[in-house]
Structures are given as structure tokens and as C-alpha cells.
Image: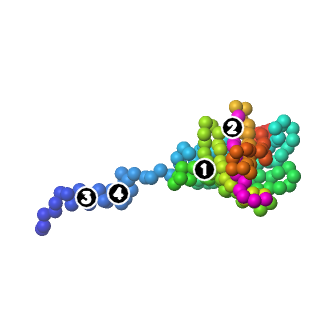
Amino acid sequence: MPKISSKLVLASALFAATASGKNAISPPPPCSASEYRQFDFLLGDWEVRGRQGNQLLGTDRYERSANGCWLQEHWHSAQGGEGTSLSSWDTNYRVWRQYWSGGDGTVLRIEGGLQDGTMTMRGVLPGKTRGEQWQRLVWTPNADGSVTQQWETSDDAGKSWQVSFLGIYRHPAGH
């Protein structure tokens, strides 16, 4: 009978243990990095009101996908319009990306990230008359549990900004 080397026996044992799953190191679940939780302050159902808090602008709902990889938004304006967005952490580029599709046919792609507790994303749309219109959306969680969303536009490459939407997000009573 030929003599079997101890190295071959050890290698065979290690392969068998690894192949059977014993002592195998499992990779972390997808989308489990802390960055995927930076937008969690938006999860849930919201009533969105104007600056003074009395004018209902609409309702919004943010929910996480079952695998935890993205957030989906369902917007319904008080005037009957609607829209949806999909937001996710892009691990390759280390930024948050959002794709918004409005009931008016507008599709906006924005990207950015969390800075000092505030989520800021930017993008570009074609200008109303010519050129580009820059977009900047900022979500700020407030101490009382509400969130302020401010959407600004610039027609002069960011030299000046105009507020196009300002909403205070509050969870409806009973939630």
C-alpha cells in the first residue's frame, strides 16, 4: 500500500470541512453595512404640511425592501398628484442615489449623502427655457421626530437657489 503524505491528509480534511460548511466563514448579508441605515429616519407613514404646519401638502410613505437594500417612497399630494422614488446606498461609489418619478412624467436622478445628520442629494434637470436646472434636496431630522424636506432649484449653476418645496413631515396621530 502506498504511503500517504500527512500534508495530503490535512489538505483533504480541510477541504471536506470547508465543503460541508463547517468552519466556513459566511459573508455578511447583503446590504447590512451601516450606510444602508442612514436614511432610516424617513421610514414610515407621514403627513406633510407647509412651513406653518396648518396646510396639508400631502402624505408620504417610506418603506424598506425585504432584503434591506433600498427604500421606496409613495407620495400623494393633497392636490391629487403622486410620485414614487427608489433610494439606495451605492457601495461602489459610496453615495446615496435616488430615482424619483413624478405623476407629471418628471424623472429626477439625484445623489449625495449624510452630512452632520442631514441627508443632501443633488441632480440636474433640463432648464425650463434652456440650459440646466440644478436640484438640491435636503432632509433634516428634527428633535421632535419630524423631518424637514427642502427642495431647491438653481437656474444659474448654483450661484443662487430658490425653494420649490418645503414640507414638514410628521407621523400621523396614532402611529
Whole-percent x and y of residue 38?
Answer: 60, 43
Question: The residue tagged with tag 3: helix, strand or loop?
Answer: helix
- 152 vs 98, left or right, is right
Vertical arrangement, residue 49 with respect to residue 4, above or below: above
Residue type highlighted by circle 2? Pro
Residue 18 numbered tag: 4
Read off the magenta span.
129-142
Residue type highlighted by circle 3? Ala
Look at mark 2 in the image and give the residue it sits on: 141
Q: Earlier in the sequence, mark 4 or mark 2?
A: 4
- 119 vs 23, left or right, is right
Distance from disc 2 to disc 1, alpha carbons, whole Å, reads: 17 Å
Whole-percent x and y of residue 172?
Answer: 79, 41
Residue 11 numbered tag: 3
Residue type highlighted by circle 4? Thr
Residue at 87% x, 41% y: name it: 55
Whole-percent x and y of residue 7?
Answer: 20, 57
Q: Earlier in the sequence, mark 2 or mark 3?
A: 3
Residue 137 is inside the magenta segment: yes
Distance from disc 4 to disc 2, alpha carbons, whole Å, reads: 46 Å
Quadrant in the picture for the N terminus: bottom left
